Amino acid sequence: MFFIQLFVMSVFHSCLGENGLLRVYYPGNIIIGGLFPIHLKTNRTDTSGPLFCQDYDIQMFLRSQVMIYAIRELNLPNITIGYDIYDTCGDVGLALRATLQLLKNQSDPQSCLVPADAQSKLPEPKTKVVIGERTSEASIAVARLVALSSVAQISYGSTSEVLSRKYKFPTFLRTVPSDEYQTRGMVELVKTFYWQTVIIVGSDDEYGKYGSDSLVKTFSKTNICIEFVHILSADFNINGAKTQTELTELLEKIKNSSAEAIILFTKEIHVEIILKEAIKHKFNRTWIASDTWSSSPKIFAIPDIQLAGQVFGFIFKQIEVPGFKDYVMSIFNGTQKNAFVEYYLTQHPLCSNQSEEVKVNNCSLNYQLESNQCLGTSFLANCIDKEESYNIYLAVQVIGEGLRHLLKCDDHHCERSSKFTASEVQERCFLIVLLLLFCC
């Protein structure tokens, strides 16, 4: 499933949308929930004041539109499939808040999620399945919550091996391979180049810690030496003296090491900090990228990135979402707009004439744009990725196929009504993923 590859800040206050979350909702007989970090982070660790979402991401905006597009493409006779999608801002707390909203019994929105009597059944949510989250850290938190109501969760980007443990996460599914395959691939890469010594840098979260542990375990079965493993502190992404001290110490250890490759199994935001400092000190080393940043436009947009040295990256198989590019070109007309599109236009209005448009084919410019920089639809079309977008499209297809089986639908009618439980959907989706994708 992997290939080897060489190779604006915007702010909105948390009062946007229902319960402080940017949200798009479309009613239907069946509701599919969605969790997308359209803003990549919050100021939660920077200040104790009001919560803000930061770093609006055009590619994540487009991925949310993939879900809407794919749902519209589903064709179940006499049944309308709706959606309820939230911007979680890359924040676990906001992801949980959005999940609680999705799990509410929408026929009685004032009811509590957990009944007073511990023996009573939880209320049946109208949201029958949730697509998301993106990161393993957020998905693990969400998975524990949705399991209470037996709601299926299908992630398009969470790869941590721990999520494969069905006894812990019984309703979690994904359309992306687990890190088990990625770590094996990294070890094979090192063996292929006959490198004898490596360094592993991971993040202090489920993705980085489990990934680093898996690498250590797999390398222990070879003759390859791990010079050291460094797990970044939990607040490494904060600009401050503590982060700078840790960064200086880490790069000093790398500089003095004889390791032939440095594996960065961590978040994109951490990699950006490390590589910028490496470029400043004119490092010329070999880096191995995990899937979180191996094809990141933001990383490739770092000035003088080539001075950091060569990068070997692992990426997922790339497949274009059929018909989506044409859909993107049309979503700004009056009939296709939704709340996320309206918000996008507050960040980047459409250019009134072609001379104002950004003339570039590389979506990495996304991270250099000023707020309110006008953009043409052709720029958006160039920002459509072929990895996570297809995983999201696939998740919707899995749900659609599961519903067809559950409701006994053909091209003209469904034998069963749209009244069913979330656990029934979860069972059907599990079978579809197991049979078609082999990566649940």
Image (cartoon, rainbow, N blue to C red):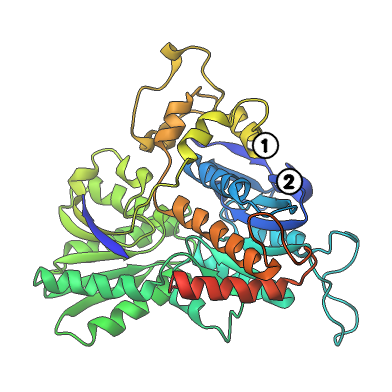
Residue at position x 24%, y 44% in the image: 305
Q: Residues within 10 Å of mark 1 (few under 14, many from 20)?
A: some
Q: Amino acid at mark 2?
A: Tyr
Outermost residue, front side: 412
- Marks 1 and 2 sit apart, C-alpha to C-alpha, by 9 Å
Q: Nearer the viewer, residue 234 or 422?
A: 422
Q: Position of residue 298 (x, y in %)?
A: 38, 44
Q: Report if the CB atoms under discs 1 and 2 are less than 8 Å apart.
A: yes
Picture coordinates of residue 70, whole percent (x, y): 57, 49
Q: Which circle marks residue 338 in the picture? A: 1
In this picture, residue 126 sits left or right of residue 227: right
Please name the residue that numbered disc 2 is placed on.
26
Could you tell me which secondary element the residue under label 2 belongs to? strand
State whether residue 92 appears in this view.
Answer: no
Q: Secondary structure at mark 1?
A: loop
Q: Residue at x 10, y 68 (%)?
A: 193
Q: Residue furthest left?
A: 194
User: Where is residue 410 shown, x and y percent of the image?
Assistant: 64, 60
Q: Is residue 377 above or below residue 428?
A: above
Q: Amino acid at mark 1?
A: Asn
